[in-house]
Amino acid sequence: MRRLEWTPTWDEFLVGLMVDEVNKGRKGDKGFTKESWNYIVSEFNKKFNVNLNQQQLRSRYNYYKKEYKIVKTLLSQSDFGWDESRKIVTAEPEVWDRYILAHPEAKQYLTKGLPLLGEMGKIIGNSAADGKALPSSHRGEVLEEAARGMVALQSENEESDSSEDMNASYQRYKRKYVTPTSSCHSKKERKGTDLAALAAALQEMAASSRFRASLITGANSKQELKNCIEELQTMENLDDVLFVKACKMLKDEKNALVFMTLKGHRRLLWVKEMCDAL
């Protein structure tokens, strides 16, 4: 039997179908439902006028999981980065050499990109997005959005000098760690420092006496937790295990405030990131 030759167009369409099915809630802990697979096979064959069976598409799905796992593991290493424009893993030659000696399966990703990494993150794992697999640049965007949101919220609800204190903490982080540069190499080296520094800046904001005083306590605090849980229940692609972890995490008032500040996909990414640390 002749080996099936997959094309980038085929991969993009198949992954797109799977993402749609995940968004519709048709993928559980054990994978896609039977009805979902039947739909995927039907739509794929109709699109490309072919006659592939479910096993062939399942095999390709398993291949995606293998690729995703390898790249996810690479990106969890501090010496590796992610080039968003080229969709490729980056590292110094000596770093690659050491890693490939211990993990020969990763050699192909020295030159091979993974254009569908983000989409694969939505269809692989227990939920629609696996925070551990996110390139660090994406995690940084979520943290920075949280910082901006906290400053904005403080400005709305507190006196001006207090909001200035909060904004000053954020600006100190920006001046110290975020400086414009055209060097990709320099950006890669600063990646870990930037994220750690922004996390520290967030903690500094939350720890300030005026900010802590602004946190709602007593009956209002219970209402805020209720509001957070109601928001959680409206979020798509949040499985039961992650939901329970998120409920526990949001008992912390600082976490609740950040959660209510973030919107859309950034809120989901932040929830994943926080729950993975539990």
Image (cartoon, rainbow, N blue to C red):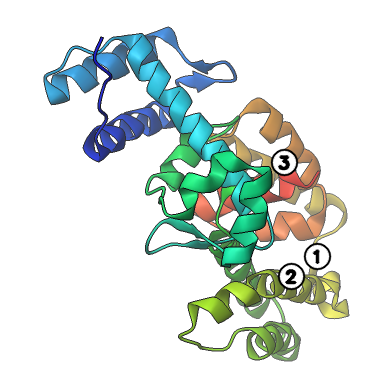
- Residue in front for this viewpoint, 160 or 277: 277
Residue 226 image-quadrant placement:
top right
- Residue in front for this viewpoint, 161 or 34: 34
Which element carries disc 2, helix, strand or loop? helix
Residue 12 at x, y = what percent? 29, 38
Which residue position holds label 1?
Answer: 215
Which residue is drawn at the image coordinates 81% and 47% (left, top)? 251
Which label was assigned to residue 29?
none
Residue 185 image-quadrant placement:
bottom right
Residue 254 at x, y = what percent? 78, 60
Res. 97 in view: yes
C-alpha separation, residue under disc 3 versus residue under disc 1: 19 Å
Residue type at the position of mark 2:
Ala
Residue type at the position of mark 1:
Leu
Which residue is drawn at the image coordinates 65% and 72% (left, top)? 147
Is 85 left or right of 134, judged from the image as shown? Answer: left
Residue 155 at x, y = what percent? 64, 80
Quarter that holds the C terminus: top right
Furthest toward the left, the residue is 49
C-alpha separation, residue under disc 2 versus residue under disc 1: 24 Å
Residue type at the position of mark 3:
Ala
Which residue is drawn at the image coordinates 55% and 64% (left, top)? 137
Instruction: Rate crowding at label 2 as few (under 14), some (14 to 19) or many (20 or more) other CA atoms within 10 Å.
Output: some
C-alpha separation, residue under disc 3 versus residue under disc 2: 22 Å
Which element carries disc 1, helix, strand or loop? loop
Which residue position holds label 3?
Answer: 246
Disc on the earlier residue, 2 or 1: 2
| CB atoms of marks 3 and 1 within 8 Å | no
Which residue is drawn at the image coordinates 37% and 61% (left, top)? 86
Q: Judge depth for marks 3 and 1 and give the one in front.
A: 3
Is 229 left or right of 20, judged from the image as shown? Answer: right
Which residue position holds label 2?
Answer: 196
